Amino acid sequence: MAVDMSMNVLIVDDYKTMLRILRNLLRQLNFVNIEDATDGTMALNVLRQTDIGLIISDWNMEPMTGIQLLREVRSDDNLKHIPFVMITAESKTENVIAAKEAGVSNYIVKPFNAETLKTKLTSVLGEF
């Protein structure tokens, strides 16, 4: 099944430059509907008001971290089906394990490029 490139993608990062980089990378991959949030609480508001098909979130944010957001999403019956990709500068094994236990769909370690993002998203969404 082909990936719907018009699906809404939510990117979550408290660093505006990273949001801009992610938005540009997603556009290079032909995603057109990109929402953003600067923290987990704002992301939950977007998720509850908009039909989101994919979440890409940074791990390190305040006041709600990416892992806390992931746990909130996975515990919500209306949201738990949404693929969730975590981005982090940390490649610590315990973080990867914690993210997997919380139900992360995939994991990207910074820095990364469009090719890495496409590979990770293909593993989550299928070919596009």
Image (cartoon, rainbow, N blue to C red):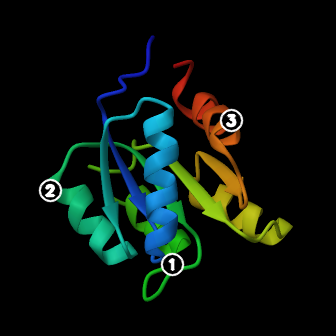
Q: What is the CA distance from the residue labelled 3 to the residue labelled 2? A: 31 Å
Q: Residue at x 31, y 76 (%)?
A: 41
Q: Residue at x 74, y 69 (%)?
A: 95
> Mark number for residue 115?
3
Q: Residues within 10 Å of mark 1 (few under 14, many from 20)?
A: some
Whether residue 70 is visible here, answered yes or no, is no
Q: Residues within 10 Å of mark 2 (few under 14, many from 20)?
A: few
Q: Is residue 79 left or right of residue 12?
A: left
The disc, 1 or 2, on the residue closer to the chain's N-terminal end is 2
Q: Residues within 10 Å of mark 3 (few under 14, many from 20)?
A: few
> Mark number for residue 65?
1
The disc, 1 or 3, on the residue closer to the chain's N-terminal end is 1
Q: Which residue is mark 2?
A: 49
Q: Is residue 112 above or below residue 65?
A: above
Q: What is the CA distance from the residue labelled 1 to the residue labelled 2? A: 20 Å
Q: Is residue 26 left or right of residue 110?
A: left
Whether residue 42 is visible here, answered yes or no, is yes
Residue 68, how many percent across, how many down?
A: 49, 74
Q: Secondary structure at mark 2?
A: helix
Circle 3: residue type: Glu
Residue 15, how many percent across, how many down?
A: 48, 76
Which quadrant of the figure contains the N terminus?
Answer: top left
